[in-house]
Image (cartoon, helix red, strand yellow):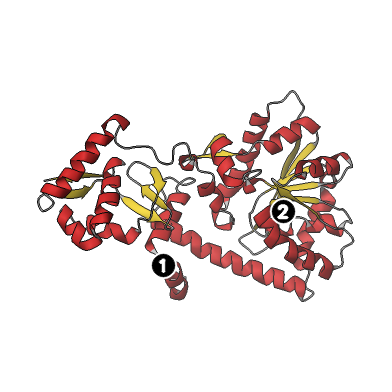
Amino acid sequence: MPAKQDGRAIAYRKQDLAFELWNLRALLPDAQQGDLLRIKRQQDEYLAREREALAGLWSGNRAALVPGHSFFADHPELATGITASLHLGPYQLLAEPYLAAGLRPVIVLNEQARRSFQPQAERLVKHLGHRGRIEWASLGERGFVRAMIRALRSGRPVLVYLDGNTGRDGNKATRDQGMRYDLPGRSIRVRTGLGRLACRLECPVHRVALAWDEDGSLRWESDPSMQWTRNDDPRTVTRFLYDWCFTHIMRRPQQWRYWAMLRASSSCFRSAVLDPAGVPHGLREDFQQAFATCMERSPETVHLVLESEAEVWDGRILADLSRDRFYPAAGLQDADLNVLRCGHPSLADLSRHHGRAWVSFHGLRLCLLGMARLGG
């Protein structure tokens, strides 16, 4: 691999790498930093290939569309029902064969994704001269479910990216109310709305994934279509669909484009458990009084000992990596912890370094969360 690419991957800030490695370990619990950097280098390679293919479409080279057209011709069942896919490989091309066939698919996305995806998709559709047109349905917006139902009942296809995993009230509602789904290294929360809809309407559900082969060719893959009834359990259906989704992700992690889905839906970030007390509630007042006494009477001899591997991610999340617990950063910066990582400073040393107010708040809070202790 060229040294320039190695340098670009290693240029990520330390805390970004730590956060992304933790994220990767949801799928690969034993992954090390070298595995993360290798995947990042491969991502760069596939993105370059993808940009070249998409640029070719604008210049008249439609070779990238041929596999999709052949696949669609071999699978006429895709013209109706729900097609479930994921952000893998050149996922932007999923709708193209439908449009080339003159269909009017409904594409379901969260609002943020729709705002970035819709303009470029519609420009490309116009450039290609397709007869079909896209109807967009934004997850969580009023009436989006009715739009899906109306399309399905009229025989039009509905395209859904499973790993979007949001709906009304966004990621917070997913974390707090979603169904628990266990990955090899962590549990996340997933939405069950698609499973409920599939059972309610008893419509066919097709599973389609796009990916690049090692030789640079574009592969379309599908598994047998499924059709559930109102007697089926939507949670079981949901688990079945996500099993399929993560099978593809585990097979080609370097081509997955939505790693943010894992951290956005991690069970450990649920608001109900985001800030549990490390010190039992009944002892908190006593501990606070003891800490204040040490600050007043013996700051030169009492030390603050960091007991956890602690990091601050993205300026927002205080991560206790020793216990796999996470808290709001509350203004703490990752660099603030360096003095604690390098030794066991006294409360007086910390006050001279950070200021008394910092020690009274962040020093005490680290102790209350069980991440640090007072020592002689």
- Residue reaching furthest to the top: 231
For mark 1, what is the residue? Answer: 10
- Secondary structure, mark 2, is strand
Q: Amino acid at mark 2?
A: Trp
Residue 106 image offset from top left, x and y in percent: 80, 50
Residue 304 image offset from top left, x and y in percent: 19, 49
Label 1: how many Cα within 10 Å (few below 14, some 14–19, many 20+) = some
Which of the pair 288/280 is nearer the observer?
A: 288
Q: Nearer the viewer, mark 2 or mark 1?
A: 1
Instruction: Identify the disc placed on residue 103.
Output: none
Q: Is residue 324 left or right of residue 68?
A: left
Label 2–label 1 contact, CB within 8 A: no
Q: Is residue 123 left or right of residue 130?
A: left
Label 2: how many Cα within 10 Å (few below 14, some 14–19, many 20+) = some
For mark 2, what is the residue? Answer: 220
| Number of numbered discs on residues | 2
Residue 133 image offset from top left, x and y in percent: 85, 58
Rounded to the nearest angstrom, the CA distance separating label 2 from label 1 is 33 Å
Quarter of the image holding residue 342? bottom left
Quarter of the image holding residue 332? bottom left
Query: Residue at position x 55%, y 57% from top?
Result: 254
Q: Amino acid at mark 1?
A: Ile
Query: Residue at position x 69%, y 60% from top?
Result: 115
Q: Is residue 319 visible?
A: yes
Q: Is residue 321 above or below residue 286?
A: below
